Image: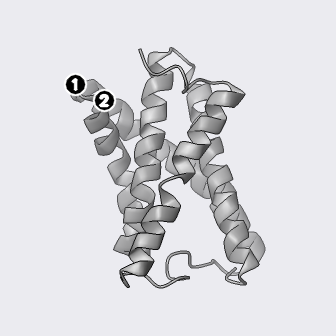
Amino acid sequence: MGPPFITATHRGFLIGFVGWVAPVPPITALLVLSSLLQPGDVYRSTPGPWLSFVSLCLFAPLLETVLLIVPTVLALRAVQKRWLACLIGCLPVVLLHVADGWQKAVIVLGSFAWAAYCYAVLAEQKESLRTRFWFLAGIHSLGNLIVFGIHAAFGEV
């Protein structure tokens, strides 16, 4: 059975969200400090702030959640170790981010691996597919909303 702190509750969602966001700042800071990444290089905006907002906070979470769930389900069926199945399951959506530079893929790897892990735990707890989908899409959307807000505050959107 999965850990009791990942559940389809408000508390479980909050913990899921913290797990989603937690790896991003230290990895980004490490890449910036090592001069492998310049601030503003990662999140290129689409034309116009509203299109950026809709793209980042609505379309990306929905599409990327589907792209995460399908390989994660297949990997969980094929691999005995949950952590390995979660890494395998998150690879397609992580590789999708390589188009914005390998640094972006490195930054999102931890978040998507965590999301795959949350999916596996919720599946083990027999939560419905609908609940699992909206749990992951919700933490993804909220995380992107924060990223959008930070970049908008610095005039990068």
Q: Is residue 48 above or below residue 122?
A: below
Tell how many labels. Answer: 2
> Of the numbered discs in the image, which one, if any, rests on residue 38?
none
The part of the image, by quadrant, that contains residue 47 is: bottom right
Quadrant placement of the N terminus: top left
Q: Nearer the viewer, residue 29 or 58?
A: 29
Q: Which residue: 60% across, 36% down?
A: 15
Q: Is residue 86 above or below residue 141?
A: above
Q: Residues within 10 Å of mark 2 (few under 14, many from 20)?
A: some
Classify residue 137 as left or right of residue 107: right
Q: x%, y% of residue 24?
A: 50, 60
> Of the numbered discs in the image, which one, if any, rests on residue 80?
1
Q: x%, y% of residue 121?
A: 45, 25
> Tag 2: residue type?
Arg
Q: x%, y% of residue 147?
A: 64, 65
Q: Nearer the viewer, residue 9 or 56?
A: 9
Quadrant placement of the C terminus: bottom right
Q: Nearer the viewer, residue 139 or 68?
A: 139
Find numbered disc 2 in the image and state the secondary structure of the residue it sits on: helix
Give the residue number, with chain letter if any, for mark 2.
Answer: 82
Q: Which residue: 53% across, 52% down?
A: 22
Q: x%, y% of residue 29?
A: 47, 71
Q: CA distance from mark 1 to mark 2?
A: 6 Å
Instruction: Tell me if I can see residue 56 in this picture.
Output: yes
> Tag 1: residue type?
Gln
The part of the image, by quadrant, that contains residue 82 is: top left
Instruction: Tell me if I can see residue 134 in this picture.
Output: no
Q: Which residue: 37% across, 36% down?
A: 72
Q: Which residue: 57% across, 34% down?
A: 133
Residues at badges 1 and 2 in contact (C-beta under 8 Å)?
A: no
Q: Residues within 10 Å of mark 1 (few under 14, many from 20)?
A: few
Q: Nearer the viewer, residue 130 or 43?
A: 43
